[in-house]
Image (tube, rainbow, N blue to C red):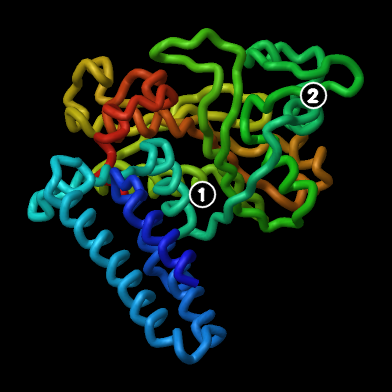
């Protein structure tokens, strides 16, 4: 037993301790709940009675030796210039960066919330679509020139044509195929166009498209819905105007402008001195689109609209370069921290 004690004494004295991690390992080894010295104490019962007192004193001395060595090294480390101990605990800590939601997420959520107040549900669908849902069911026959309006990323051509969806109208087709009227839904999501990336165009962007189908739905219902949206998004003084346009899946169709909130419709370089800013396209759902989804166009009518989330964000935040929304520049994103 004496030899074991002397051996551990040599270990304690010879331990090289240069930092807090090594000191902690020393403490666990010699002073912890399952340390080497405690193991020797448990063997004390096997020592003859005449030697037990002497061995007990040696063990207590060994324990004190380990504790003294620990205290001395700890004191030396705390008074050293090591960065681990030379810390002014009264100084403020390092700042924690506050995250923020992306400006497009903020605008998307606001759009969804506005239409949720008037009973529109949210529908989602796949970003890779077949020809039927992306084109044919929306009144785009194979030879229709309107197909040329949208440059498409095709994944597979031919009989089983597949492509990245060019609009979220494909989600509306799926809703009409699986739900019976009345239908009142919006379809937010990412879409893709084969276009050169610039300040005004991108190969992917985000849309929110709306669909309402029921009996006796009129163009007046469409106009009032969009006026409500514009005033909720841009302020109660916002006004809209509708200009005749063309979309294969709606008839009649219109482009919608909102009064410029930057110059209060007086004219500025943002609205090109017209007092109006284009925000979305809309129209009454073409009867062919309803029939393609087995909805009786003689009984039901409906309207549809679609807007680019980036476009609304541009008007809301006055950011006119589309590339900024997808470059993940922290300097740009930090501007929207207060919006969370």
Where in the figure is residue 193, as x and y percent of width and height? 60, 18
> Which residue in the rendered view is the most extreme toward the top?
196
The residue sitting at 34% across, 33% down in the picture is 258
The residue beneath circle 2 is 162
Quarter of image, res 267: top left
Marks 1 and 2, Cα distance to the nearest angstrom? 35 Å
Q: Position of residue 218 (x, y in %)?
A: 57, 47
Depth check: 199 or 248 in front?
A: 199
Looking at the image, residue 72 lies above or below residue 287: below
> Who's the residue at 47% across and 27% down the image?
255
Occupied quadrant, residue 283: top right
Under circle 1, the secondary element is: helix
Up-down relation of residue 32 to residue 119 (above or below)? below
* Residue 125, numbered label: none
159 relative to 313, above or below: above
Visible residue check, residue 216: yes
Marks 1/2 in contact by CB < 8 Å: the verdict is: no
**Seen from this angle, which residue lies furthest front?**
50
Residue 221 numbered mark, or none: 1
Q: Secondary structure at mark 2?
A: strand
| Viewer-closest of 88 and 27 | 27
Q: Residue at x 31, y 73 (%)?
A: 61
């Amino acid at each position: 037993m004496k030899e074991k004690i002397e051996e551990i004494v040599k270990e304690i004295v010879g331990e090289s301790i240069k930092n807090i991690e090594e000191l902690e390992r020393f403490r666990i080894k010699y002073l912890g709940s399952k340390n080497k010295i405690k193991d020797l104490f448990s063997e004390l019962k096997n020592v003859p009675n005449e030697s037990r007192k002497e061995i007990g004193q040696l063990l207590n001395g060994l324990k004190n030796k380990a504790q003294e060595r620990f205290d001395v090294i700890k004191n030396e480390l705390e008074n050293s210039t090591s960065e681990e101990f030379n810390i002014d605990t009264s100084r403020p800590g390092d700042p924690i960066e506050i995250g923020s939601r992306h400006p497009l997420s903020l605008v998307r959520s606001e759009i969804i919330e506005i239409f949720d107040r008037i009973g529109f549900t949210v529908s989602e669908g796949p970003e890779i679509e077949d020809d039927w849902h992306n084109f044919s069911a929306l009144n785009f026959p194979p030879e229709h020139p309107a197909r040329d309006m949208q440059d498409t990323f095709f994944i597979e051509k031919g009989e089983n044509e597949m492509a990245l969806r060019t609009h979220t109208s494909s989600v509306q087709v799926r809703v009409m195929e699986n739900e019976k009227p009345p239908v009142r839904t919006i379809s937010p999501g990412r879409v893709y166009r084969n276009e050169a990336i610039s300040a005004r165009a991108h190969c992917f962007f985000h849309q929110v498209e709306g669909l309402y189908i029921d009996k006796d739905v009129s163009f007046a219902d469409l106009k009032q819905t969009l006026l409500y949206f514009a005033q909720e998004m841009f302020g109660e003084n916002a006004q809209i105007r509708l200009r005749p346009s063309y979309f294969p899946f709606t008839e009649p169709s219109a482009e919608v402008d909102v009064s410029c909130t930057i110059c209060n419709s007086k004219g500025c370089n943002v609205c090109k001195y017209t007092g109006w800013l284009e925000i979305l396209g809309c129209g009454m759902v073409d009867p062919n689109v309803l029939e393609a989804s087995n909805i009786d166009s003689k009984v039901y009518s409906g309207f549809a609209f679609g807007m680019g989330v980036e476009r609304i964000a541009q008007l809301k935040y006055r950011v006119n370069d589309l590339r900024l929304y997808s470059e993940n520049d922290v300097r740009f994103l930090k501007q929207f921290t207060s919006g969370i």
